[in-house]
Amino acid sequence: MSKPDVFLPSLYIRLAIARVRGRMRYRVGFLLMILGVFVANTFEFVALLVLFGQVRELGGWSAGEVALLWGMSQMSFAIAEAFGHGFEGLAPQVRSGEFDQVLVRPLPVFFQVFASDFQAQRIGRFLQGAMAVWYSRSSPAPIPWHASDWTILTFAVITGSVIFFATFVLGGAWALRVVDGQEFMNTFTYGGTTLASYPLDLFSDPIRRAATWILPLAFVNYFPALALLGRVAPDGILPFGLTPITLALSAPIVALVYLGIAVVVWDRSVMRYQGTGT
Amino acid sequence: MIVAEALKKSFRVTTRRTGGFSAFRALLPGSTSQVEAVRSVSFSIAAGEMVAVLGPNGAGKSTTIKMLTGILVPDSGTATTLGLVPWQSRRSVAKRIGVVFGQRTQLWWDLPLSDSLDLVRHMYGVAPQRFAENLATCRELLDLDPFLDRPVRQLSLGQRMRGDLAAALIHDPEILFLDEPTIGLDLVAKARIRDALTHLNQSRGVTVLLTTHDLADVARLCQRVLLIDHGRVVHDGGLEALRTQFGSGCTLVVDLAEPSASDKAHRHDAHETSERGVSPLVVPGATETRSEGNRRWLAFDRREVSASDLIASVASRYPLSDLTLEEPDIETVIAGLYASRTE
C-alpha cells in the first residue's frame, strides 16, 4: 500500500480556487456580494463621520485618527474572515452532520475546516478599511508614512488578522461543544471588531484589560496606531509600561501565542466531539 | 476486515431550551440526559462480504458505522477496521475506506461533478494514472457522462448519489460504508446503485457494509443481515432466516365457490337466512381475519399447522373455487418486529 503524500499548501490553494470558482459561477451575485459588503461597511464608516460632524474629538481622538483605527481593524477582520470562515460557519455543519464528512477524510481536521470556505468576497471589507486608512490623512497631525510607518501598518494588519482568525478558530471549537452557541461567539468576533474600531482608552478598565490580556484586540490596532500617530497613551493602559512601538512590534508574538492556544483548544474540542458526538 | 466487540456508546442529550440566552442556559447542569445509542454490538465481517444493517430509526445503526469509520470513539468495547482501531488511526483508515452518507453530499455544490471528483483525487493523493482509470470505471459503472459537467446543485437526487458513490471510489477503498445509500431514490436510480455495488463487490472484491430501510436493497445485495435494535444485534444471518425466525404467521386466501341453485334451495329449506351465508369459516388451526364477498382470509401459524394440511381441511369443509397462500413479506415481518420491540 503506497502512501501518496498530499502537499497541504498546494491543496489549500486548490480548494480555495474551487471555492471562488464555485461562487463565480454566479458572477453577478458574486460581484454584488463584494459590493454589498463594501457598501454596508461604508455606511458604518459614514455613521462614524456623522458622529464627528457633531463633535470635533472623541476622548482626544480626531476623526482621522479614529478612521485609522477603524480601517486597520476592518482590514484585519476582512483577511481573517476570508481565511477563517470555515470555522465561523461550522455550527450548521455540526448540526446537520456534515462535519462527520470531514472525519472520514485522510487529512487533518483543522486543515479541512480551514480550507473549506475561502471567501474572496471579503475584499469588499478590506478595500473599505483601506479607504478609511487613506482618509486618516485628514487628521490634524497626519502620519508622515515613512517606510517604517508602512512596515508597522503591514505588520499590524497581518497580526490583527491572525488574532481575529484565532478567534474564529475558538468560535469553531465552541460550535463543536455547544451546537447552538453561534450568537455567543459572534459577541467576540463581530463584537471584537466594533470594540477595536474605537480608541481603547475610551473604555473602562475591565474592558481594557480584557482587550489586552484575554482577547488581545489592543494588539490588532490600538498599540500600532499609537505608534503610528506618535500619541501618548493614558497612564496604566500600556502593559509593563512598554512603549507603543515595542508593543506594536511584539504583537506578532502575542498573535502567535493566541493562535497556538486556539489550535490546542480546537484539537481538544475535536477529540471531545468524537468522544461525545454532540 | 471489520470486527466489532461489545461496542457501547451513549450520548448526552441536551434538553432543548427555548427563549432568551439559550446558548448560556445549555451550559447549565441538569439539562442533559443520557441516551444509550449502542449498548453492545458485536460482529465480524470477512473480506468480500456484503452486509446490510437493518433496524428502526434510532436503533444505533448510524452510530455503529460512525465508530467503525473513526468518526466517533466508543465508551467501551473495541473494534478494528482493516486491522486498525479506526478512532486511533483515523487518517490511515480513511485512506482505505469509502464512506457515503445518503442524506448528505461530500461534493462541491456549485462545481461541476468532474471538478469535485478531481478535488477528491487531490485530497486522497491519488496518482493521475490511477485516477484516470478509476474515473473511467466510474463513468461506465455509474453512467456519469450525462451529468459529469453539470454543477452538483442541478443534479437529481439519483445522479447526486451516483456522484457521491464515485467520489467514494476514487481512491480504491477496500471497504465501502454506505449509510442509507438509496434513501429517497426512485426505482430506476435504486437499481443503478445496486447494480454498481454488486459489480464492485464481485469484480473488485470490495467489502460493503450498508444501512438501509429498503428491504429490496437487502434482498438484491446482501447475503447477510445484521438486525440492530435498541443498540444490540438481534439477528445475524440471511434474510430468509429472518423470515422463518420471525415471520411464521401466514395467510390463506380462499375464494368460496358460488353456491349452486340447489344448494340455495336446500339452505332456504333449512330456514337459513342469506346473512347466515357470510358466517366465518371454521377451520382448526386458523382464524378468519377478513371477508369480502366470497373471498375469505384465514390467518395461521406455520409452526402449528402446515399449509397443505390447512388447505386440505378447508377444501373438505367448504366448496372452493380458488386459493392463494400469502407469506408475510419481509417488510411486514420487520415492521412487526420493530413494533414489538419499541415499547
Image (cartoon, rainbow, N blue to C red):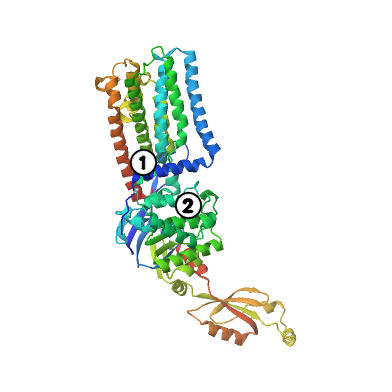
Locate residue B242 relative to residue B188 in the image: left or right: left
**Do the residues bearing badges 2 and 1 touch, measured as CB atoms within 8 Å?**
no
Task: Compare residues A19 and A234 and report the one nearer the observer.
Answer: A19
The disc labelled 1 sits on which kind of residue?
Ala
> Which chain's residue wears label 2?
B
Which residue is identified by label 2? B114
Residue A35 location (% of width, % of height): 52, 31
The disc labelled 2 sits on which kind of residue?
Ser
Q: What residue sits 46% from the left and 59% below the top? A: B136
User: For residue A173, which numbered disc appears in the image?
Assistant: 1
> Which chain's residue wears label 1?
A
Q: Residues within 10 Å of mark 1 (few under 14, many from 20)?
A: many
Task: Compare residues B193 and A276 and report the one nearer the observer.
Answer: B193
Counting labels gives 2
Locate residue B324 relative to residue A190 in the image: left or right: right
Q: Residues within 10 Å of mark 2 (few under 14, many from 20)?
A: many
Residue B38 location (% of width, % of height): 37, 58
List the single residue furthest toward the left.
Answer: A240
As drawn, A133 above or below B240: above
Q: CA distance from mark 2 to mark 1?
A: 33 Å
As drawn, B47 above or below B322: above
Q: What residue sits 35% from the left and 30% below the top? A: A158
